[in-house]
């Protein structure tokens, strides 16, 4: 098979697996902190094994990198907890759509990390996202779980945007597997004091669901990212990654019989359209910078 086609198939499988993580918010009978701890524990074991056997080694290059890894791990811990919490409060569809406000949030945070400026097109994208979110929110009240889920989901998106910017600027010289290995290593001791007794008393079925989430749906796709990028442009990767909500919602409809409303679907379409636009626009601006330099 052609290497590019093989990489593209591998990338779609990676994004499908990452989209599948959303289902575990409903399948695992634990709260978001317990799920995140279990996910991180099993992901950490496999990711460090991958890093060790790949010959990359486990050590980081400097003391500064250990500090950065610690910060990234703390942010990821809160991001993953709020990610699962948003879906448990509302639904898989609402939670994943709220999360994918992060490309637009990233655009407005970038000036604080890089030498960029917000364009009028970015403001239009933000307005489109706000319209999409407004369609999803059923009632402007914190007493409504769906509304609360949207708010928590946007908080998760904000943290994810910060994590991505920090990672891109200070930690991108490590492979995806090694970077995530260190982040999951930090997540475990961060959350260990907050886990409930329910995690200790889980049955075999719940244990295997946590193993699957941490390995097959977390460690494996992060390890696959590097191989996918060997024959694909970063722009292609980013655009395919925007399909994660589509896969998550499709899986939720088929596997757990979730019934998203038309407002959720239309709002989701607006949010994802803005995410796709910002992805394309970001790469276009990067190409201009390279040509000028």
Image (cartoon, rainbow, N blue to C red):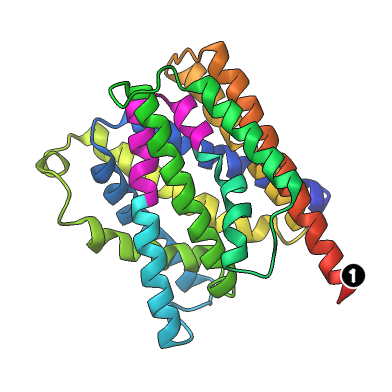
Between 31 and 229, the residue placed more toward the observer is: 31
- For label 1, the SS is helix
Residue 23 in sight here: yes
Whole-percent x, y for residue 49 in the image? 42, 66
Residues rendered magenta in the picture: 79-98
Between 218 and 211, the residue placed more toward the observer is: 218
Horizontal placement of 85 versus 270: left or right? left
Check the image and report above or below for 212 versus 245.
Answer: below
Residue 29 in the magenta stretch? The answer is no
Whole-percent x, y for residue 28 in the image? 29, 32
Horizontal placement of 249 versus 188: left or right? right
- What residue appears at the point 53 percent right and 77 percent down from the top-left corner? 55
Count of picture labels: 1
Residue beneath disc 1: 291
Check the image and report above or below for 221 versus 166.
Answer: above
Residue 80 in the magenta stretch? The answer is yes
* Magenta part, dominant SS: helix
- What residue appears at the point 17 percent right and 34 percent down from the top-left corner? 203
């Amino acid at each position: 098979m052609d290497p590019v086609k093989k990489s593209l198939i591998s990338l779609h499988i990676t994004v499908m697996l990452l989209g599948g993580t959303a289902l575990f918010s409903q399948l695992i009978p634990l709260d978001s902190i317990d799920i995140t701890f279990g996910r991180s524990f099993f992901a950490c074991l496999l990711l460090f094994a991958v890093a060790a056997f790949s010959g990359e080694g486990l050590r980081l290059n400097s003391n500064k990198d250990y500090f950065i890894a610690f910060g990234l791990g703390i942010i990821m811990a809160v991001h993953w907890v709020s990610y699962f919490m948003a879906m448990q409060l509302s639904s898989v569809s609402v939670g994943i759509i709220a999360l994918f406000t992060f490309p637009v949030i990233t655009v407005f945070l970038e000036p604080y990390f890089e030498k960029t400026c917000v364009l009028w097109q970015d403001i239009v994208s933000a307005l489109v996202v706000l319209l999409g979110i407004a369609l999803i929110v059923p009632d402007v009240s914190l007493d409504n779980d769906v509304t609360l889920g949207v708010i928590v989901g946007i908080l998760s998106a904000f943290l994810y945007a910060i994590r991505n910017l920090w990672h891109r600027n200070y930690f991108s010289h490590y492979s995806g597997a090694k970077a995530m290995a260190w982040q999951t290593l930090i997540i475990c001791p961060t959350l260990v004091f907050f886990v409930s007794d329910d995690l200790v008393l889980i049955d075999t079925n719940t244990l295997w669901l946590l193993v699957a989430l941490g390995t097959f749906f977390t460690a494996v796709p992060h390890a696959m990212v590097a191989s996918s990028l060997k024959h694909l442009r970063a722009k292609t990767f980013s655009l395919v990654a925007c399909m994660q909500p589509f896969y998550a919602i499709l899986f939720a409809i088929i596997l757990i019989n979730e019934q998203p409303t038309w407002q959720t679907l239309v709002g989701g379409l607006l949010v994802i359209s803005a995410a796709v636009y910002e992805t394309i626009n970001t790469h276009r601006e990067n190409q201009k910078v390279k040509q000028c330099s």
